């Protein structure tokens, strides 16, 4: 890319800084936790239309998706008005490579809002930080790719290849939003998801599985606890037994090569417990929700077998019944070659804009990149801004970083898709 075009692109994105903050403010102010995504998706639909793309709504048809690889059992059966928004750009003449720019609009719950310094859906700016639930994960990323695209248009250019903008739902629990878009036929020569991974380029992600243990015991008055079997006592035992499997998988000999330098890649988390009904009654029923991570290459069947085996081996009271069931994430891990053209091209764009080497990253979570990479024949990665406390209190994203990511994406689009003058 010649120096003068580069300067123009960087300047055009920088000029959009206030617009970036405004768009982010509107999106973060729209609570888009599971089931509530409608308002935020309506906003992004308008944005995609404003960018001149042909906008489509893609629904999540569970019957249709349930037979596809990558499907996860839903955590809500409510699909009413819950759509993915897709914006299609077609050039006058195709000369470059096609691209999907994908982001998820759903955000995770806030937890007790009194533990936030300010209400989670009342975004505000402090120095370079933009605060609010979903700011980093990942509304800033969506705003960044929209403004990268818009900045090129400001200069009178558009991508000389098909570009598909996607704002999907359910990334945080099943991935069925991205799966629905894939099933609708949207593939490309590459996909980028600006997840908040600190301007590093994703080369591997873990598999993630959610499961639930339903424990049933025997109720009794606490005055004679020996007469009952407390499910919470057994849950402690089961959790500790599962932690043994976590320890085992973290041993160097079990690791996928991308995770050899990691401190503790595999994390098992007991995230939610419901159960018991009275402080003076031996608890006889509980449901416990777990999340486990596992390496690329481990099949879902293997993981399930290991979990069942571990639970069977736990030394719990004989009259406690344990049922294991699966809802939510059944996500395989995946990796992409560091030498892939997509990765090299992102690194190059980052180097030009940030004037530093782009780090690569093997993350210990999952992202929607798996759908493109594993089932869509579309090389995929994540590259997004610096953020802190994602999924925590006082989540925040760096504004400078968001602007810079938009610059990198604009340069990437120019290189990858090529540019043509808007007629
Ligand atoms: Zn995310």
Image (cartoon, grey):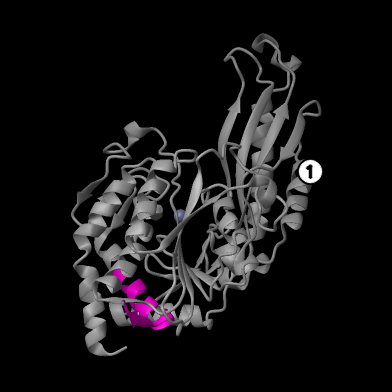
Q: Quadrant of residue 160?
A: bottom left
Q: Nearer the viewer, residue 211 or 265?
A: 211
Q: Nearer the viewer, residue 62 or 171?
A: 62
Q: Quadrant of residue 387?
A: bottom left
Q: Nearer the viewer, residue 277 or 127?
A: 127
Relative to residue 208, is residue 403 depicted above or below? below
Q: Does residue 28 show up?
A: yes
Secondary structure of the residue carrying tag 1 is helix
Question: Which corner quadrant holds the N terminus?
Answer: bottom left
- Reading the image, the residue beneath label 1 is 313
Q: Which residue is rendered at x = 19% and y = 58% of the image?
A: 18
Which residue appears farthest toward the front when viewing the image? 423
- Helix, strand or loop: magenta stretch: helix
Q: Which residues are magenta?
A: 404-422
Q: Is residue 198 located in the magenta-colored stretch of the structure?
A: no
Query: Looking at the picture, how far across and down is residue 177, in whole percent?
Result: 55, 52
Q: Image check: 357 left or right of 253?
A: left
**Local crowd size for mark 1, using a 10 Å CA cut-off: few (<14), some (14–19), many (≥20):** few
How many labels, in total? 1
Q: Which residue is rendered at x = 61% and y = 49% of the image?
A: 329
Q: Quadrant of residue 197?
A: bottom left
Question: Which corner quadrant holds the C terminus?
Answer: bottom left
Q: Which residue is rendered at x = 73% and y = 25% of the image?
A: 216
Relative to residue 364, is residue 359 depicted above or below? below
Query: Looking at the picture, how far across and down is residue 393, in whole percent?
Result: 36, 43
Q: Image check: 144 left or right of 220?
A: left
Which residue appears farthest toward the bottom when viewing the image? 2
Q: Is residue 417 located in the magenta-colored stretch of the structure?
A: yes
Relative to residue 105, is residue 14 depicted above or below? below
Q: Nearer the viewer, residue 415 or 373?
A: 415
Q: Does residue 354 show up?
A: no
Query: Looking at the picture, how far across and down is residue 399, in whole percent?
Result: 25, 60
């Amino acid at each position: 890319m010649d120096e003068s075009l580069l300067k123009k692109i960087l300047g055009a994105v920088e000029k959009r800084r206030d617009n970036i903050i405004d768009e982010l403010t509107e999106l973060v102010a729209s609570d888009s936790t599971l089931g509530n995504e409608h308002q935020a998706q309506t906003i992004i639909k308008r944005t995609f239309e404003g960018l001149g793309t042909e906008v489509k709504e893609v629904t999540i048809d569970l019957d249709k998706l349930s037979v596809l690889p990558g499907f996860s059992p839903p955590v809500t059966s409510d699909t009413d008005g819950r759509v993915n928004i897709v914006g299609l750009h077609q050039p006058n003449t195709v000369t470059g490579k096609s691209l999907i720019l994908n982001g998820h609009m759903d955000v995770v719950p806030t937890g007790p809002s009194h533990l936030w310094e300010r209400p989670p859906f009342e975004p505000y700016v402090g120095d370079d930080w933009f605060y609010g639930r979903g700011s980093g994960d990942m509304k800033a990323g969506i705003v960044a790719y929209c403004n990268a695209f818009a900045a090129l248009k400001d200069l009178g250019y558009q991508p000389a290849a098909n570009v598909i903008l996607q704002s999907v739902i359910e990334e945080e629990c099943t991935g069925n939003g991205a799966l629905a878009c894939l099933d609708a036929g949207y593939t490309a020569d590459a996909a980028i998801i600006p997840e908040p991974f600190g301007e590093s380029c994703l080369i591997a992600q873990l598999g993630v599985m959610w499961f639930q243990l339903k424990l049933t015991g025997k109720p009794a008055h606490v005055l004679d606890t020996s007469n009952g079997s407390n499910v919470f006592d057994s849950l402690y035992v089961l959790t500790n037994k599962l932690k043994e499997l976590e320890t085992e998988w973290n041993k160097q000999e079990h690791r996928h090569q991308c995770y050899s330098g990691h401190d503790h890649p595999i994390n098992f988390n007991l995230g939610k417990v419901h159960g018991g009904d009275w402080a003076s009654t031996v608890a006889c029923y509980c449901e416990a929700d777990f999340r486990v991570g596992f390496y690329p290459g481990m099949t879902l069947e293997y993981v399930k077998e290991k979990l069942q085996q571990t639970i069977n081996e736990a030394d719990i009271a004989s009259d406690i019944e344990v049922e294991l069931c699966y809802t939510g994430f059944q996500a395989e891990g995946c990796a992409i070659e560091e030498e892939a053209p997509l990765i090299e091209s992102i690194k190059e764009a980052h180097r030009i804009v940030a004037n530093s080497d782009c780090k690569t990253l093997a993350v210990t979570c999952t992202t929607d990149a798996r759908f493109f990479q594993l089932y869509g024949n579309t090389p995929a990665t994540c590259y997004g801004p610096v953020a802190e406390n994602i999924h925590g209190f006082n989540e925040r994203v760096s504004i400078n970083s968001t602007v810079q990511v938009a610059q990198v994406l604009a340069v990437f689009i120019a290189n990858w898709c090529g540019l043509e003058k808007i007629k």
